[in-house]
Amino acid sequence: MPALVASDLDRTLIYSAAALALTMPDARAPRLLCVEVHESKPLSYMTETAAQLLTDLGDAAVFVPTTTRTRKQYLRINLPGPAPTYAICANGGHILVDGVSDPDWHAQVMARLADQCAPLAEVQEHLLRAADPVWVRKHRVADDLFAYLVVERELLNEDWVKELAVWAENRGWTVSLQGRKIYAVPKPLTKSAAMREIARRTGADLTLAAGDSLLDADLLLAADQGWRPGHGELADTDWTAPAIRALPERGVLAGERILREFLRTVRGAV
């Protein structure tokens, strides 16, 4: 039976220039591979060593990129290794099969959201009204599933984020601050539900996961084993659980370490 590896992407396996955390002398910095170009500019990277590890992992397990990105944002990433058959986008709102959204899965998700939480329009309206234009740069809706703000972190009042979280909690939504983005996501919209569905389809008897943010917590808890890097929301709150390993590495080297752990565990299970 195959092993299934569901991993978050941004700040877990791939990193923007601002998130690389290259603290070593320049001459000892790892060689980097650009894996995403946006508007003709390089945007995301992994180390060349991580690229080889991911290629090896794609040959040894069912690798499932698992992201809060929209389908369009995900599809501009060019990961090394075999093209994944499955991917999870929009925090579980879409399961892509060979790059195309599974309509039955998406319909199930939409029905669950309509039944269990306040509508997106209400949350979007609250964000537009309550957020301060001094620190908000963009308002966005992702795949008609959730909303997020792009903000100036140095100007952001983090007490406002806590107040937003309380407001959202009472309406069946959750709030996550990741880098320059504040996400408001319906609670039933989860990466874990999509991972379980792909595990069912593939017959996987071992599930592994990694992630750095609050939106990855359910994914990590649903997997047989999980890893989190030494940066991000989960590290900042010392979040952990019995089957979760907290790694000390931060930045792009954490992505390399996570892939080593995936590969070691998959090979050990054979």
Image (cartoon, helix red, strand yellow):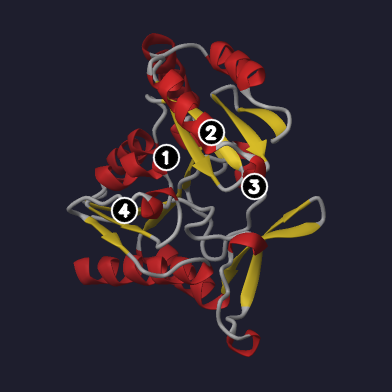
Q: Residue at x 82, y 56 (%)?
A: 40
- Spot occupied by residue 117 in the image (x, y as percentages of width and height): 41, 14
Q: Earlier in the sequence, mark 3 or mark 2?
A: 3
Q: Could you tell me the amino acid type at mark 3?
A: Glu
Q: Secondary structure at mark 4?
A: loop
The residue under label 2 is 183
- Spot occupied by residue 68 in the image (x, y as percentages of width and height): 51, 40
The residue under label 4 is 238
Q: Secondary structure at mark 2?
A: strand
Residue 6 seen from this side:
no
Q: Mark 4 or mark 2, which is nearer to you?
A: 4
Q: Secondary structure at mark 3?
A: helix
Report if the CB atoms under discs 2 and 1 are less than 8 Å apart.
yes
Instruction: Give the quadrant of the C terminus.
Output: bottom left
The residue under label 3 is 154
Q: Residue at x 50, y 11 (%)?
A: 119
